[in-house]
Image (cartoon, grey):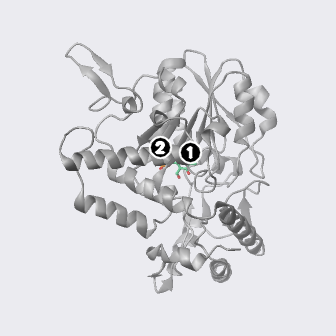
Amino acid sequence: MSLDISAIRKEFPILDQKINGKPLIYFDNAATAQRPLQVIEKMDEFSLLTNANIHRATHTLANKTTEAFESARETVRNYVNAQEVAEVIFTHGTTESINLVAFSFGEAFINQGDEVVVTEMEHHANIVPWQMMCQRRGAILKAIPFADNGELCTDQFDSIVTDKTKIIAITHVSNTLGTVNPIAAIISKAHERNIPVLIDGAQGVPHFRIDVQALDCDFYAFSGHKIYGPTGIGVLYGKRKWLDQMPPFMGGGEMIDRVTLSRTTYNQLPYKFEAGTPNYVGAIGLASAIQFVQNLDHQELTIYENQFLTAATLKLKQIEGLKIYGEAPQKAGVVSFNIDGIHPFDLGTLLDQLGIAVRTGRLCADPVMDHFGVENMVRASFSFYNTFDEIDVFYKALIRLKAMF
Ligand code: PLP
């Protein structure tokens, strides 16, 4: 293993601190990953020296900002291997990206009685926008269930997807179960029936290198803050053939070609979908985060993350009364669990007293809670900057807390 975790950790100064008197163990990466120094410095430097609104003025700072923003778009295009920069739309995050597609695709292509298919393991961000659109357009939302081990019931695809299905929206990686869905196979099956597929990549991008052309997905949505970049910036990749036919999501500056008081014509892609001043500093930070990740050996990262997940899972399983939700054979670094007799909120609060940051609650996935008949869960989610020693500290903390109850 050539991955130097201690060198990587030095790039993340936030990790080197005590919380409640104990060394921080940050196991809440699926909610937000930490940012390396180069991202923070890039954004600071930009704000200190260059800041000006983009695309609107001819002065030097405006030109520099515009150039940096468009260069960030090219960095994203290259990273996900989109065919052209026009297919890369900057949004505030995955949530906005999905809302954009649900609204605009819905307006263009969904009619009374049509069907939209999601899965039972979606984050609310990939359920609610579709429900809202279905309500507006008189369409029906259906969901492919998952089995108790967290695997998607792909065998039910043919009975749930019908000739009324107009779009399938599915998460790449479940934020709750950690399940890695077989998206390439689903896309290819959907395309046999000419059905486009949106991938919610919020939890996919942190673990996989994405090639949207190889995947042949129609839309891929992700957030900057889950891939070591800033909050408030995200991406919607969309195939031009769809984006060209979809009406704008929001109206305002930048998305227009010409406005009169009686009618407006719209700008070309991608600007048609970028109304108002975008988060250009965020986009520049995101590009820096992508460059950071690109400089790491992806194969080594994958090996490390897989070994880490296996080690954490085996350790947690030694704890009597601990139930893990989601043990699909293809899984990314997320372990959600409960311990008999301990309320997840108590566990989260007490772990915090020991310096350990985990997520507790419904994990923005009510249908997953309903599936298992629980109100809440505890979730530990990992990154390449977590160390195997941290698993031991976590394990010992859980044993200690369990003994207290
Ligand atoms: N989809 C998944 C699978 C997620 O995990 C998240 C965030 O946790 C989202 C969508 C929403 O992302 P954001 O809040 O950055 O828009």
| Mark 1 vs ligand 1: CB below 8 Å | no
Q: Residue 258, image x and y in percent? A: 25, 20
Q: Is residue 162 left or right of residue 197?
A: right
**Residue 68 vs residue 350, the one in the foreground:** 68
Quarter containing the N terminus: bottom right
**Residue 277 vs residue 392, the one in the foreground:** 277
Q: Is residue 25 visible?
A: no
- Mark nearer the viewer, 2 or 1: 1
Q: Residue 403, image x and y in percent? A: 67, 82
Q: Is residue 30 left or right of residue 313?
A: left
Callout 1 crowding tier (Cα within 10 Å): few <14, some 14–19, many ≥20: some
Name the residue at the bottom extreme. Answer: 21
**Are the residues flagged by discs 2 and 1 in contact, CB closer than 8 Å?**
yes
Q: Residue beneath label 1, please?
A: 80
Q: Residue 282, image x and y in percent? A: 37, 53
Q: Is residue 13 visible?
A: yes
Residue 235 is marked as 2
Q: Is residue 372 above or below residue 190?
A: below
Q: CA distance from mark 2 to mark 1?
A: 10 Å
Q: Earlier in the sequence, mark 2 or mark 1?
A: 1
Q: Is residue 151 above or below residue 321?
A: above
Q: At numbered mark 2, what does the secondary structure look like: helix, strand or loop?
A: strand
Q: At numbered mark 1, what does the secondary structure look like: helix, strand or loop?
A: helix
Q: Residue 366, image x and y in percent? A: 59, 47
Looking at numbered disc 1 in the image, what kind of residue is underneath it? Val
Please tell me which residue is depicted at 67% across the width and 39% down the height of the picture: 214
Please tell me which residue is depicted at 25% across the width and 45% down the height of the picture: 63
Looking at numbered disc 2 in the image, what kind of residue is underneath it? Val
Quarter containing the C terminus: bottom right
Q: Is residue 228 above or below residue 136?
A: below
